[in-house]
Amino acid sequence: MSLCVPHPCFNSCFEFCSRASQLPAKRESTFYCFSSFIICKYALDKYLERKGMTMQIKWVIVGTILVIVIMDSYKPIVIAEEDAVKKDFLAEYEPSALKLADYYSNLRMRFAVSEQDFPSRKDRVDYEIVYMANGSLYRLDSPNRDSTGNLVPGSRFVRVVTPELSFIVSKRANDAIYSIHTIDQDYSTMLETLRLNAKAPFAPYCFYETFIPELIKKKTCKIRAPVKIPGKDLMKLDFELQLPGKLGLLVGWMLFAPGDCWALQEYACGTSGRFPNEDCSRCVVVYDGKDAEIPIVKQVEQWVENREKRTRIISLKVLEMRPGPVPASEFTLDAFGIQIGKATSNRWLLLYVLLGILATFLALVFRYLAKRHSKLTESKDS
């Protein structure tokens, strides 16, 4: 049996292919693909001529190899180009975003919220929220809502998010003390929920509940190189985000001000195929002055736009802001008159009650089994 030994030129062909997959430019990749094709064709001419195969078979093999070369070489280049765009943008943007996050994570802010489904209806709801932060410690104090979603006057609903212990406490209008609503929740999940409900202090550096650098670093997110807006100190960043499951592709853009610590000015997004005409989510952030290099948030407007008609309008206006970390004591259960020891003792009490019920149940079962065994023994003896 004779062995089919590949022609030495095949090695050169595959070496060229591997080099093509590592090139940063498509033009150079095309050159190496074409070179690979010529070398491969020459090798096959000699090899198939020796084997006596037909010209049709030769071209089928050459065409197949050429397709494989092109598919294998271009895909890594596209990924490399996308990664390069992300890397270049984050190198300039992320340090500024971290400065914004640090500033707005160490202050106390009070802001008014206005909610309205349709501008033509008299369904506007107004209330105030108090936001406090100290590094990784966050607190959001807002009115409570009933089961139908309506605000309850005089009630409070407080979210506290810390790495050690995150919890929610609430108080009804006539109650003198707070009660625990939720405790021991995941830090990341609670922080994202707090960002969605607070909006104003997170608007300069977050897209909804996500820190913008973290969003861009996701493999499911693609961006184009930012473009400068003519005549303005603004940069526009187009992006695509693959949503989980069958939610589809989210497309949109963000507008940043490089001269104002790259603070987010505006964004628009929607589902691919419907954006920007239908169900387009819009947000505009208004600033008033600076504290050193940090722009100060004054107002945030958020709405959904359908062919220029606005619905679900939310407006947040900052009433008071005091920079500087809030004392850590404000982020504990003690701040609401709740002792952790008491909460723990209640848990142990519940556990003891459950164990008591279980012990009683087991005692009744064993008693029943003992009686049954005794009756069976008596019947056998008789």
Image: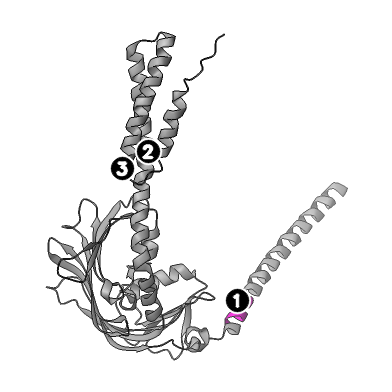
Query: What's drawn in magenta, residue-wise?
Result: 343-348
Q: Percent position (x, y) of residue 214?
A: 40, 63
Q: Crowdedness of circle 2 by 10 Å Cα count: few (<14), some, many (20+)?
A: many
Q: Nearer the viewer, residue 317 or 50?
A: 50
Q: Amino acid at mark 2?
A: Ser
Seen at 46% across and 68% down, the residue is 188
- Tag in front: 3 or 2: 3
Indicate which disc, 1 or 3, sits on the residue closer to the N terminus.
3
Q: Nearer the viewer, residue 136 or 44?
A: 44
In this view, 257 is above or below 290? above
Residue 42: quarter of image: top left
Q: Crowdedness of circle 1 by 10 Å Cα count: few (<14), some, many (20+)?
A: few
In this view, 75 is above or below 285? above
Residue 23: quarter of image: top left
What is the CA distance from the residue labelled 1 to the residue labelled 3? 64 Å
Seen at 82% across and 49% down, the residue is 379
Residue 338 badge = none
Disc 3 element: helix
Q: Main SS of the magenta segment?
A: helix
Q: Percent position (x, y) of residue 374?
A: 81, 55
Q: Which residue is mark 2?
A: 73
Q: Which residue is mark 1?
A: 347
Residue 215: quarter of image: bottom left
Q: Percent position (x, y) of residue 193?
A: 39, 70
Q: Which residue is mark 3?
A: 26
In this view, 268 is above or below 42? below
Indicate which disc, 3 or 2, sits on the residue closer to the N terminus.
3
Indicate which disc, 2 or 1, sits on the residue closer to the N terminus.
2
Q: Nearer the viewer, residue 126 or 43?
A: 43
